[in-house]
Amino acid sequence: MIQFTREYEEIGTNEPAWQGCRTLVTIAGQQAPLGDIILKNDLPRTMELFADPLILKVFYNLLDNAARYGGKISTIRFSVEKSEKDRIIVCEDDGDGVPVKDKERIFDRGFGKNTGLGLALSREILDITGISIRENGEPGKGARFEITVPKGACRSNTQAGSGPGTGTP
C-alpha cells in the first residue's frame, strides 16, 4: 500500500505531455503480471495523447486488474474508436466482467479487493487533461473500459520516432 501510494503521489505535479498510446500499452504489458494472457495492442503507431506522465500507470492498472480479477480471461485488447468529436481508447477482455452494481463504484477510493485505489487514481490522472474513463462491459462476457479522449488531447504524429513520448515502440 505504501509503495502504491508513493508511485501516485506525483499526480498533477508534472506537466502533461504528448505520449504515444501504442508504446504506453506495450510498456505496461511488459510490466504487468499477465502470465498466459494474450495482449492485443491494436492502437495506431502514430496516435498520441496529451496526458499526465503517469498515464502509463493507468494502462498498467487496467492490465493488472484484468489479470487479477478477470477470472477465465485469456485475452486483453486495446483498440481505438472514433466518435464525432472524440477518440475512445477501448481496453476490453474476455473474462468475467464487472457486475452492473459495481460499474461506477470501482472508481471509488477504497472499493475493491486490493488497495482500492487503482481505478480511483487512474480516473484522477486522466481527469487532469479532460480525459474520462468508464466501464461499459457486459457481465459474464468481459470488462470493457472506455477512455474518452477529447479531440484536442489526441493527435496523429506521422513524424513519430521511438520511445514512450513519441508514438511508436
Image: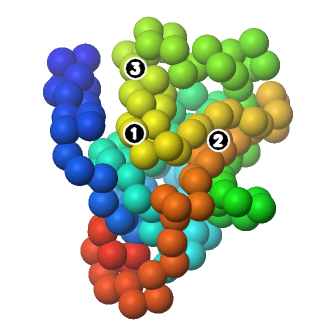
* Horizontal side of residue 164 vs 75, given as left or right: left
Q: Earlier in the sequence, mark 2 or mark 1?
A: 1
Three-letter amino acid code at disc 1?
Answer: Ile
Residue 30: x %, y % from top left: 36, 58
The residue shown at (77%, 62%) is 84
Q: Which residue is mark 1?
A: 128
- Callout in the foreground (3, 1): 1
Residue picked out by circle 2: 145
Is 125 in front, or is 92?
125
The Cα–Cα distance between marks 2 and 1, rounded to whole angstroms, is 18 Å
Tell me which residue sits at (58%, 20%) in the image: 106
Question: Alpha-carbon distance for marks 3 and 1?
Answer: 17 Å
Q: Is residue 108 above or below residue 97?
A: above
Say if 11 sits above or below 115 in the image: below
Asked if the residue under mark 3 is in contact with the one under mark 2, i.e. CB atoms within 8 Å, the reply is: no
Judge the density around disc 2: few (<14), some (14-19), many (≥20) Cα neighbours within 10 Å: many
- Amino acid bearing label 2: Phe
Q: What x and y, as percent, mark residue 130? A: 50, 43
Looking at marks 2 and 3 on the same chain, the residue that comes earlier in the sequence is marked by 3
Q: Helix, strand or loop at disc 1?
A: loop
Q: How many marks?
A: 3
- Disc on the earlier residue, 3 or 1: 3
What residue is disc 3 on? 117
Kindly identify the amino acid type of the residue bearing the numbered disc 3: Leu
Regarding residue 11, the answer to whether it shows in the image is: yes
Instruction: Report the side of 77 relative to 96 (left or right).
Output: left
The N terminus - image quarter: top left
Which numbered circle lies on residue 17?
A: none
Q: Residue at x 25, y 26 (%)?
A: 4
